[in-house]
Image (tube, rainbow, N blue to C red):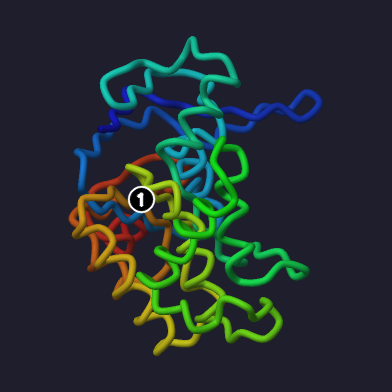
């Protein structure tokens, strides 16, 4: 589904060139669950953004579903993201002024469909994440775990082929974090590919692939082994 070949990402601030990713090579088959680990500032979120087509690499080749995307216009990338990619954030990013079901419907506003159809699809996803009993509530009336379930429903409502999740349990206690990881694992078992950034080795164990980043480079072995080297 995804193949990165010699991917690098550089940022320039005034006269200073910073390399966030260096010579990344990886592949993610359809239906796989990949976890990305590493210390703060090592490039995890940058790699996740590149994989989710939220950012473009400076060098290298990115293939998505067999097509190289280097020459795609932003409008083409936006279309791919809307149709094939769902994003789950650590901070939930729900809209306080909208109800639970309205927050999920937001992801469908760019699709030309009747309001009744949007409501039907949003309710279907909220049922899947166990939040259909709270559709009229607002984010401020929900716990952190409930808000993340709504955020996951929003990411899933387009029936994407890929979910990218940036520390999806980072703001949750251990019990709620485990519930969210079970939910993400169940989603993956339906055939949806998942790429997740996490600091938790326990949560990384849900994945088929575990990648470790250090100073913008993929390293072999565990993070502790890599640092010891």
Label count reads 1
Residue 54 in which image quadrant: top right
**Left or right of 108 on screen, residue 212:** left
> As rendered, which of 45 and 150 lies closer to the eye?
150
User: Quadrant location of the N terminus?
Assistant: top left
Measured as percent of width and height from the top left, residue 124 is found at 40, 64
Residue pushed farthest top?
71
> As rendered, which of 198 and 2 lies closer to the eye?
2
**Residue drawn at x 51%, y 28% as measured from the top left:** 79
**Residue drawn at x 71%, y 81% as measured from the top left:** 140
SS assignment at label 1: strand
Q: Is residue 112 above or below residue 192?
A: above
Q: Is residue 128 above or below residue 141?
A: above
**Left or right of 133 on screen, residue 208:** left
**Left or right of 159 on screen, residue 29:** left
Measured as percent of width and height from the top left, residue 182 is found at 29, 75
Residue 22 in which image quadrant: top left
Q: Which residue is mark 1?
A: 195
């Amino acid at each position: 589904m995804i193949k990165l070949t010699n991917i690098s990402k550089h940022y320039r601030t005034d006269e200073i060139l910073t390399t966030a990713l260096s010579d990344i090579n990886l592949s993610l088959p359809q239906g796989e669950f990949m976890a990305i680990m590493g210390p703060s500032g090592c490039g995890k979120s940058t790699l996740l953004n590149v994989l989710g087509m939220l950012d473009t690499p400076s060098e290298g080749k990115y293939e998505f579903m067999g097509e190289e995307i280097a020459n795609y216009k932003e409008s083409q990338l936006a279309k791919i993201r809307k149709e094939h990619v769902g994003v789950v954030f650590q901070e939930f990013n729900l809209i306080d002024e909208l109800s639970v079901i309205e927050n999920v419907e937001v992801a469908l506003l760019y699709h030309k469909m009747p309001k009744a159809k949007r409501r039907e699809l949003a309710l279907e996803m909220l049922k899947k994440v166990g939040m259909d009993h709270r559709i009229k509530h607002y984010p401020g009336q929900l716990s952190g775990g409930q808000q993340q379930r709504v955020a996951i429903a929003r990411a899933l409502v387009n029936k994407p082929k890929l979910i990218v999740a940036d520390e999806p349990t980072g703001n949750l206690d251990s019990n709620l974090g485990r519930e969210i990881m079970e939910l993400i694992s169940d989603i993956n078992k339906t055939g949806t590919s998942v790429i997740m950034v996490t600091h938790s080795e326990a949560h990384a164990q849900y994945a088929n692939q575990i990648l470790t980043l250090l100073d913008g480079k993929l390293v072999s072995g565990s993070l502790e082994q890599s640092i010891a080297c």
